[in-house]
Amino acid sequence: MTEAIKLATALRKKSDSELTQLLSARQISSANFRDFLDFADAVSDLKSVKNAVSALPRSQALALAALCRGAAFQDVDAAAARSLAKQFLIFADESAPTSTPNYRVLENAKTVVLAFGPIEDKTFENTEIQVDHNLETANRDAGVAAFETMQALTELHFDVDQRLVREVGKRGVGLPDLKRLAQHLRQSVDFAREIYRLAAHTKLLAASDGRWMLGAESDAWLELSPADRFKSLASYWLQSLGEESARELLATSRHFQGYSLSALFRQTYPFADEVVNSRISTHEAFAHLIGLTAGQVRTSWFELVLENNLDEASSQIEKCLPQTQERLIIQADLSLIAPGPLPTHLEIELRRFAETEQISMASTYRLSALSISHGLETGLSELEIRELLSDLSAKELPQPVDYLIREANDRFGRLTVTTGPGEARSLVKSVDQILLTEILNETKLRPFGIRQSPEGYLFSRFEPDVIYFGLRESGFSAIRVDGAGKVISPRSVATRTSSISVITSVTTDLERLRDHDERLGTDPGADDLTRQIEFALKNRSRLLITATDRAGKSHEFMLEPKSLSNGRLRGIDTKAEIERTLPLERLTSAVPIA
Amino acid sequence: MADGPLIVQSDKTALLEVDHPLAVEARHDLAVFAELERAPEHVHTYRITRLGLWNARAAGHDADFVLGVLDRYAKFAVPTSVRTDITETMGRYGRLVIERDENDELVLSSQAGAVLVEVTRHKKIAELLTHPRSQNVWGVAPWARGQLKQELLKLGWPAEDLAGYAEGTPHEIALNQSGWQIRGYQTEAVDKFWHGGSGVVVLPCGAGKTIVGAAAMSVAKTNTLILVTNTVSARQWKTELIRRTTLTEDEIGEYSGSVKEIKPVTIATYQILTTKRKTEYSHLSLLNAKDWGLVVYDEVHLLPAPIFKMTAELQARRRLGLTATLVREDGKEGDVFSLIGPKRFDAPWKEIEAQGYIAPAACFEVRIDLPEDERLSYAVSQQDERYRIASTTDSKISVVKKLMAKHRGEPTLIIGQYLDQIDKMAEELKVPKITGATPVDEREVLFQKFRDGEVTALVVSKVANFSVDLPEASVAIQISGSYGSRQEEAQRLGRLLRPKADGRTAMFYTLIARDTVDQDFAQNRQRFLAEQGYSYEILDAVKI
């Protein structure tokens, strides 16, 4: 029996989730599979095998190398062998005449592995540079890095919540959006890009309908304490690494103390190719971002994370994170400084009426007429704003701040944007006619095509949201109101993707394959029968053919097909040792014999 | 330190909580390597810049010292990126040295061969060098000392200049402290300058920068060239030098548009030095007219570009820059560092005020509602006309009158930008005016009458923005300005900061047309002073 048929038989017995994992590890698409034989073909294909081999952690790589060179299965690490079987680099050979399961190594796996030469001695080479392993410094620096990343992810949450951030290309972000985030974080654009990548990876963000939206985990993120945020990030990192790799990396980490994380990864993946190396780079970058390493040096909690002891890891890093504090310094120049991270609930409240200037160890916000107006629009009252500021600063408000809040409150609602009828989609109204004249004459607003009606109000063919943001960007404190004059909060626009259900194409494909398999056993179509016979012809394998005679009675034959032409199957009946020719129209099923 | 006064941010700013018990100590240590960027009432922002770090290296401090200071006062751990950057940046200073060889010729040397190779291969630097003397030493063209320093700084390899200074022709100068005493910070500033060789002293307006200059001259005891912004300032310098030092009128020359005297101490204006005749700077010879041992640059933040070029050739002379702010609108702070020298001393305005050496000041922004017709005219005007319409509104006249009535008898300056507004204001208020068109002599007479109390109010244009000493002025009403210029706002307040005999607080009013660009520009103008700790109270004109 050929390898493909045995493999197909083995694949059939696997669960959908195992098969999905396999497809992902092999980087193969199931879209064009007609049946499990196609699946088996793809799994034994050289390229897909290379993909699997290159991602093998060290113990599995060693086990596979030994098997490829003819070692007996009982002589290799049993756990590693089981993992290799899970990945279909070796598979159960049920045709073998033994009572215990025996395994075969995929032919192409042998080709790939043997081309590498021996890997057993490839431990750290002499040239590998050891890092200065100052644990105290590493812990301190990693704590700062983790804190900055968590701050950045939170800032990104607010940014995406309040603005329209377009998806550029496939899961890309436009430069202006990256620059804005980088500016608020006082970090580089590259850092901002990494934050987007990490946010997408951890489901805090998702790209959908051409824009970035808050992801399924985003709201939960806001509720988490810093230590729990770290746990969440570390958990995602661990998942992306995979259980096996984590275990092996842990073993390597314990064994080789003075080496960089890069060196450990190189040691852990002896067959790594370009794709795996790129994945390793991502693991390394994220490890640095979330504070598992600092400058390639592993922290005290690095191994705890690999052990999946996230509680202990987070309790250790917590000591290196700046503590939250409920304190705000309010200055007469309208700046607000939080001299340490604010608890999230306060930060959320504050951001309703203050603009962000800088998010860092100490974060800076600024009050303006527009920001206060935003707070009022979201439902805060003047009193609530004053109380929050006074409580947090424990001081009287500086006179300019007091003046600003009062003035912004007095003027709130002076300029409104509503939905208009017909082509005039937006109406801009105010009791102050000179203000409307000024808007009409404002150069920055020309692209919005705002015109004046005979009644005196202004209108535009653009949507109210567009006009609202346009007016605000030009410095006019407009608010959105509905037909009844009720204020529409700018936060009411949905920007979340939590309701988007993820149905992958793989799930559908596997369902299709299983259906096909079932039909093949009971009521196969002509195409399926033909394909099964052709496959047996190609592989010189045997089929259990069921055919009906003229009286409608079923007969079973064990045939090794020889030809298929003119609607007839010709084959050797291996039991009767004669040649049979059967008309295709009489065949009801053809099942490969394992 | 777990709960220090300092928060070091990834962008290399450091926020200092001024109410913290260790704030004063921390401020003192930070000043060595960080620039005070903002100093509002509660939290001061310092920026750790390359120039600041090189200033510290020039003063003999290394990266361990800087990181030690940050760690000592930091509330949270100092970010790794900041640590790395400080170490790398400071490691760059002094790898290259400009010095003199045994034949007194200029050479560029380095113990780091790779750095020397890197810079000597650079086209602009190669032009300034003669030939290699050895693997680690290159000859430098005799005229290229300043330019070489500029170019090396641009490449990120600032050279340590150990080539020394020409002594200059000796001239006896001493401070004459009868009836006054040099202040502690002034002495400290001079000591630091002298120890460093050349550099800049940053002090608030009214804190006695002229005395720092005079004291530096008394240490140098050599022929001195003083460069100032205008003729009025030149004359004030002369008066002060006669009053504060042993110099006599005969020893001090004025080199300006009207007078061309060259004496052991010569005061020249930037304008005369940058005057061109047939594409040539016709007064350039002044720079070499005497064997100057010291060149003083007043208001170094205003130094015009051609003076930088000329200064490049004055590197053998000691150079002292004086200013209230190192912030330059043209971004040429690097040229000040290379050509005049590193910052040697600075003190925040509020600190000097606390010591009682400058007058306390209260700042007010008075918001005026434009009348309907002016609002309409503003609403339909072109964008570029709006500031003028808003800032010159006639409504400001009545507010100025109310304020003058409120401060009746107090020496008051009304400062504006637009001549027609100044004319109208002077006419309405019936007070004298000084603009660019007022002859220097007439200006001096009016300023003197103001000082003597004969005239209690003056309407002035930007000619009075800086370098005019009006010690008794205690009220200023700003009716319009150069759009959003922060520097101008600071200079105008500076007119009021001489301590008053009766210790009263100076009052600085800015009149603003509400809901116009006048208000937007005012916000920008106020930034520098807000950063120096001055807060503006907002008043409604109708309530005055």
Image: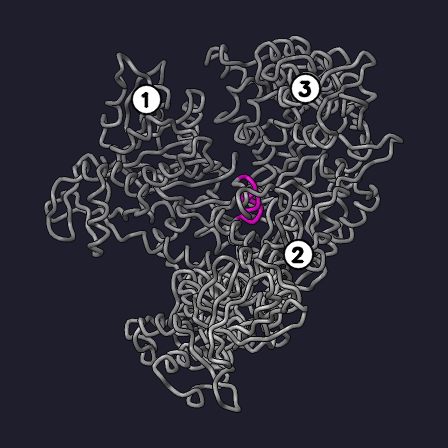
Q: Are marks 2 and 1 on the same chain?
A: no
- Name the foreground residue: A8 vs B16: A8
Q: Which residue is mark 2?
A: A503
Q: Nearer the viewer, mark 2 or mark 1?
A: 2
- Name the foreground residue: B134 vs B243: B134
Chain bearing tag 2 is A
Q: Is residue A132 visible?
A: no
Q: Nearer the viewer, mark 3 or mark 2?
A: 2
Q: Which mark is residue A449?
A: 3
For the residue labelled by badge 2, is the local secondary structure a helix, a strand or a loop? loop
Q: Which stretch did the figure color magenta?
A: A176-186
For the residue labelled by badge 1, is the local secondary structure a helix, a strand or a loop? helix
* Amino acid tagged 3: Gly
Chain bearing tag 1 is B
* Amino acid tagged 1: Leu
Whole-percent x, y for residue A185 in the image: 56, 49
Answer whether labels 3 and 2 touch (C-beta < 8 Å). no
* Amino acid tagged 2: Ile
Q: Is residue A180 magenta?
A: yes
In this rendering, would B539 be left or right of B15? right
Q: Which residue is mark 1?
A: B273
